[in-house]
Image: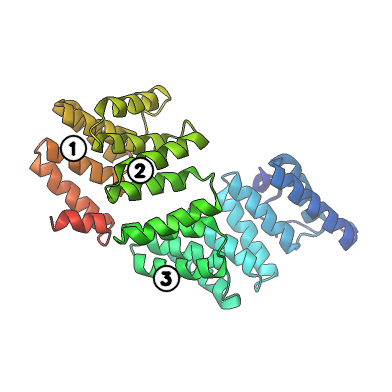
């Protein structure tokens, strides 16, 4: 653990050791090589050696922060990033990493403030716009998120992730055709992203093109056969197609592969049981799925179908209240409210 061994970067004392800039650069380069290959221990040793010799080396402080963040030491990462910024306050990279960390900690206000500082220094920083958009979406500012993502895409047209998230926001705001276009572009840029296939399947399902939705999801499973979310989404499509036995096989496979704690799988299993007439079990499964992920619109929407099948008006009303509070401008939510 980096932080527990050296403190917060700036707390290091100058050892008085002399090392040339070239030798320090070589140590950092070695650390980066180890970092990229996943050798955390070796990368740590390189960064710590640099910081022992030069406690105010901003690049080493930033890289140590990244390593801490990847190892789940968020508070340590924050201290390293802040130390790097203290040394070089006009470096947008350091601010970007701090903004991402705040976003990861759900400190959305702090994240937005820091990421806006990045844009003041570098207006064309596509990553800052991307992470700002994620924060905006998390606070139900989807139109602002859409604009920010569109700008990010225009700055970096080859970034599949930007296109995928823009597709998601368009789906959530009801423009399924545009959502489909951006998601397809994402997959053209990165054909190995299983989450993009899941998103494509969900959009096609919403467009009621169930055969193509199934095809998209099976393509995702060809990449990662045990991807639980992909199988869960596929089970939902198969239920819509009326292929209940096939859906049951997918759900049984998920459960057998330790998917009992996956809310999407449980919610679709609840839907299947509600169709098969197992009302009590369906209700219990849907309730458990909602408790496991209280903010998932997909889980709540499936639970709405379950309790509609069970004609449980009280539960239906509570679900509508919940999804309206979580995502009042989500097109799927609005469709339910005005149905």
Name the quarter where the N terminus is drawn.
top right
Disc 2/disc 3 C-alpha distance (Å): 28 Å
Disc 3/disc 1 C-alpha distance (Å): 35 Å
Quarter of the view holding residue 144: bottom left
The disc at residue 147 is: 3
- Relative depth, front residue between 286 and 97: 286
**Residue at position x 26%, y 59% from top?**
331
Q: Position of residue 139 (x, y in %)?
A: 36, 62
Classify mark 1: helix, strand or loop: helix
- Relative depth, front residue between 277 and 65: 277
Q: Earlier in the sequence, mark 2 or mark 1?
A: 2
Work out whether 114 lies above or below 174.
below
Structural crowding at the residue carrying mark 3, measured as other residues with C-alpha within 10 Å and reported as few (<14), some (14–19) or many (≥20): some
**Residue at position x 48%, y 42% from top?**
194
Q: Earlier in the sequence, mark 3 or mark 1?
A: 3
Frontmost of labels 2 and 3 is 2
Q: Position of residue 332 (x, y in %)?
A: 25, 54
Classify mark 2: helix, strand or loop: helix
**Residue at position x 15%, y 39% from top?**
307
**Residue at position x 52%, y 53% from top?**
188
- Relative depth, front residue between 280 and 171: 171
Structural crowding at the residue carrying mark 2, measured as other residues with C-alpha within 10 Å and reported as few (<14), some (14–19) or many (≥20): many
Classify mark 3: helix, strand or loop: helix
Q: Is residue 107 visible?
A: no
Q: How is the image coloured?
A: rainbow
What residue would you read off at disc 2?
213
Q: Earlier in the sequence, mark 2 or mark 3?
A: 3
What residue would you read off at disc 1?
306
Work out which residue is located at the far top of the displayed protein and give it.
Answer: 256
Structural crowding at the residue carrying mark 1, measured as other residues with C-alpha within 10 Å and reported as few (<14), some (14–19) or many (≥20): many
Q: Position of residue 80 (x, y in %)?
A: 64, 57
Quarter of the view holding residue 145: bottom left
């Amino acid at each position: 653990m980096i932080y527990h061994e050296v403190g917060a970067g700036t707390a290091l004392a100058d050892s008085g050791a002399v090392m040339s800039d070239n030798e320090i650069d070589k140590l950092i380069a070695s650390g980066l090589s180890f970092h990229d290959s996943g050798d955390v221990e070796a990368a740590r040793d390189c960064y710590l050696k640099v910081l022992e010799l030069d406690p105010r080396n901003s690049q080493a402080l930033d890289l140590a922060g990244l390593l801490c963040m990847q190892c789940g030491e968020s508070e340590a990462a924050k201290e390293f990033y802040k130390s790097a910024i203290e040394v070089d306050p006009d470096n947008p990279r350091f601010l970007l990493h701090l903004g991402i960390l705040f976003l990861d900690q759900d400190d959305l206000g702090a994240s937005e403030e820091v990421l806006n500082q990045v844009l003041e220094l570098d207006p064309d920083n596509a990553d800052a716009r991307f992470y700002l958009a994620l924060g905006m979406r998390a606070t139900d500012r989807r139109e602002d998120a859409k604009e920010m993502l569109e700008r990010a895409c225009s700055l970096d047209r080859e970034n599949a992730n930007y296109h995928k998230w823009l597709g998601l926001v368009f789906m959530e705001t009801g423009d399924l055709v545009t959502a489909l276009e951006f998601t397809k572009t994402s997959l053209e840029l990165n054909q190995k992203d299983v989450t993009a296939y899941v998103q494509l399947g969900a959009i096609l399902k919403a467009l009621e093109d169930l055969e193509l939705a199934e095809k998209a999801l099976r393509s995702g499973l060809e990449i990662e056969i045990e991807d639980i979310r992909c199988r869960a989404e596929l089970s939902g499509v198969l239920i819509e197609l009326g292929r209940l036995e096939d859906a049951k096989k997918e759900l049984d496979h998920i459960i057998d592969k330790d998917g009992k704690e996956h809310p999407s799988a449980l919610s679709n299993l609840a839907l299947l049981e509600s169709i098969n007439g197992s009302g009590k079990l369906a209700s219990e499964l849907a309730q458990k799925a909602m408790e496991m992920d209280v903010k998932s619109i997909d889980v709540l929407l499936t639970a709405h179908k379950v309790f509609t099948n069970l004609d449980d008006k009280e539960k239906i009303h509570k679900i509508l209240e919940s999804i309206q509070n979580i995502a009042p401008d989500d097109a799927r939510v609005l469709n339910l409210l005005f149905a």
